[in-house]
Amino acid sequence: MSKITRLFSFPNDSFFLFGARGSGKSFLLKHQFHNKAHWINLLDQQKYLEYSASPERFFQEISALDSGSWVVVDEIQRIPSLLNYVHMLIEDKKLRFVLLGSSARKLRREGINLLGGRAYSKKMFPFLPQELGENFNFDRALEYGLLPLVYFDADPVMRLQAYVEKYLTEEIEAEALARNIGGFSRFLHIAARFHAQTINLSNIAREAEVKRPTASGYFEILKDTLIATELYPFSSKNKVRSVQKPKFYFVDSGLVRGIQKRQHLKISDSEKGPLFEGLIYHILCAWKEYRPMFFDSIYYWKSHSSKQQEVDFILEKDKDLIAIEVKAKDKIFKKDLNGLKAFSNLHPVKEKKIIYLGKEKQKIEDIDILPFQDWLGDLTP
């Protein structure tokens, strides 16, 4: 296995680092700050109980460090009140903190303001193909996902099962939902079927046998624990109506299959399209975080007309637009261009692209047809 270099860029000052469990946050920081930082892991039950009972002990311990020292606090959301001391230590001792978490939900619920702008807020994503290099395997990425915890595991099927079970028992119990874990489990299974689709909350609530506000709250937990996200529709001053509901994506295709207990099965034709689209979205989101100079925002577009024309991703940089359509097939036909054409008839578009699973690079009219690997090559660190 060749060496893997993550594309994440470290700030020179204090920062929060959020990301789904298993995305490699702790491993990366241990490599970056090996013997260079004072490390506190709040998953250590002894430390957790000590600081919970007496948060001032945290302050006393860290106050002894030299000015300018780095301090890493893992799972900071377990004791949000420590951030009050972090704030003081940044101001008075000029210490630099890395604050890791798998959820910002509890911090917000406790009224914490994320240090009032005194620390950057960064995100960590599962592996990117560019990070894996020769270790990247497209089929494995779709089947088991790109979470570092899973990707190199000798038994990814069992690892995914354990991951989902741990998420249900730890994250959900932490959100005080233990009494209705059955309802959340049903909801989670149904939500996984809507990966890369717009959400009909009423239908999902009915199938999960929970109330609509409950289902809405469950979606918020998925987003706050960073295993899922929403993609909002593109809008402009143009008067042509477009679909206004957001699309929903899990952060990793392996999670989609693991939640549905399909990780031991071969990918079906009906799965491949959403999983491939989700992979592209994951790459775009990570690229936006790690290399923000490439584009500012990501949207999707779908017309409100009877033709229901759609473009999977609209990238915006300043006032320039790049429209991207994703096709999980090895041949492109003229009808596959309709969504891009419809969007470009309404909005000025700098580039139009189709990413597909074929081998040949093509150009049809003004639309670039790119094999997946060629498109990856265009995204250079």
Image (cartoon, rainbow, N blue to C red):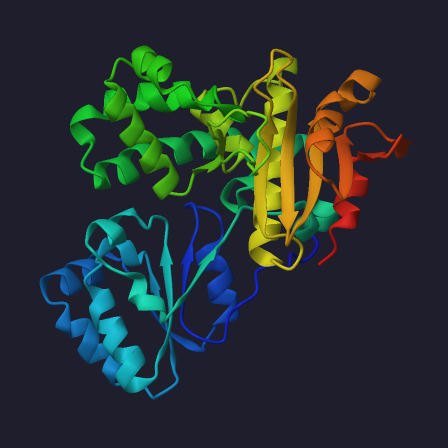
The image quadrant that residue 290 belongs to is bottom right
User: Horizontal placement of 140 versus 163: left or right?
Assistant: right
**Is residue 333 among what the camera can see?**
no
Residue 212 in the image, given as x and y percentages of width and height: 27, 20
Residue at the extreme bottom of the image, as rendered? 66
Of residues 287 and 23, the one drawn nearer to the viewer in this rendering: 287
Of residues 187 and 160, the one drawn nearer to the viewer in this rendering: 187
The image quadrant that residue 141 belongs to is top right
Residue 318 in the image, given as x and y percentages of width and height: 64, 54
User: Horizontal placement of 126 versus 18: left or right?
Assistant: right
The image quadrant that residue 306 belongs to is top right
115 over 313 or under it: above or below: below
| Residue positioned 55% across, 25% down in the render | 241
User: Horizontal placement of 213 versus 334: left or right?
Assistant: left
Of residues 56 and 304, the one drawn nearer to the viewer in this rendering: 304
User: Image quadrant for the C terminus?
Assistant: bottom right
| Residue positioned 60% across, 30% down in the render | 301
Residue 261 in the image, given as x and y percentages of width and height: 46, 20
49 over 125 or under it: above or below: below
Tag count: 0
**Is residue 120 among what the camera can see?**
yes
Residue 146 in the image, given as x and y percentages of width and height: 57, 40
63 over 341 or under it: above or below: below
| Residue positioned 57% across, 65% down in the render | 9
